[in-house]
Amino acid sequence: MTGKQFGWLGILFLLGCSGPSVEPSAPQPPTSEAANEMTADATTAESTPSANVSSEASMASAATSLEPDQYCYFGDNDLITGAVRLTVDESGQVDGDSVVSIHNEEAGYYSSYAQNFAGELLGDRVSLTVSTWIEYDLQAVDETWQVTAETLTMSSGDSFFATECDDPAVTQYFIGPGGVDSATLLADLPPAQRVEFAPGTSQTTLENSLVRGDRDVYLLGAQGGQTIVLDIYSLEDNAVFDLVSPSGMIMVQEATSEVLLLPQTGDYQLIVGGTRGNTTYTLEVAIE
């Protein structure tokens, strides 16, 4: 996302004999049968490079089973329901995300997880580093998935089948309340500022002024299972915030007051902007 070279070793055996010497006979022209064999050998030798070129072309084609594009898959069976999105670039690099719910009625086990992944596509296999958020825990492992334009099978054996990326079965997992996904929401943002709490506290106040169209971005580290309390005020009554989870899930959009149970461990992105004109805001943040 190799070929073998073979070397030929020729071994020459010299055999002596003790009998009387024999004068070598004069060279004779090849018979018609021998001439035909020589012609066939030459033809085979000339055709070999062409065969090699064809073989190399086939290998190059097999090296990328998916053309550069975005691909989406949906799975629904007795154990899981969910969707996967992945993007392949010109060099075969892959990144994407997935959201899956688990419903094993026989075992009485119900859960869900979100994933981000990145890696390299080789043939119909993609080698990935996968970050998985499940039940307030964050796991990072290397996995190999099988993927074609029709199907995707994870290391767990869970299979998903190709569908359009605007299929509601897919978009329900990735599109926020404002009708966009986190990649669109987070595009062209300024550098983020990390929120720090004073020693012994778990709350702070953030203040700033923004001209129309500008946004502030804050990074807030938290543990899954904690509760976040957010309240924003502005003189113009036009400041709002968005909150995006570590996996990229849009939790709220254009809100002014929220109390939320945090589902994942990691850095949450808190985005502040104005709904109209300039704004001067005060944002109170607390983690419980």
Image (spheres, grey):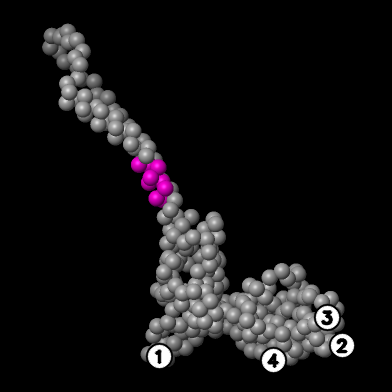
Amino acid type, residue under disc 1 in the picture = Glu
Q: Earlier in the sequence, mark 1 or mark 3?
A: 1
* Above or below, comparing residue 207 to residue 123 in the picture: below
Residue at 60% in and 84% down: 263
**Residue 287 placement (x, y as % from top left):** 71, 87
The residue mark sitting in front, 2 or 4, is 2
Q: Quadrant of residue 282?
A: bottom right
Q: Is residue 8 left or right of residue 193?
A: left
* Above or below, comparing residue 245 to residue 92 in the picture: below
The residue mark sitting in front, 1 or 2, is 2
Residue at 63% in and 85% down: 177
Circle 4 sits in a helix, a strand or a loop, which is it?
A: strand
**Mark 1 sits on what residue?**
105
- Residue 61 in the magenta stretch? The answer is no
**Mark 2 sits on what residue?**
235
Estimate the spatial distance between the alpha carbons at disc 2 and disc 4, rounded to whole Å. Answer: 22 Å
CB of mark 1 within 8 Å of CB of mark 4? no
Q: Earlier in the sequence, mark 1 or mark 4?
A: 1
Q: Is residue 216 left or right of residue 160?
A: right
**Mark 4 sits on what residue?**
259
Asked whether residue 270 appears in the rendered view, the answer is yes
Circle 2 sits in a helix, a strand or a loop, which is it?
A: loop
Estimate the spatial distance between the alpha carbons at disc 1 and disc 4, rounded to whole Å. Answer: 32 Å
Q: On residue 181, which mark appears?
A: none
Residue at 38% in and 45% down: 54
**Mark 3 sits on what residue?**
277
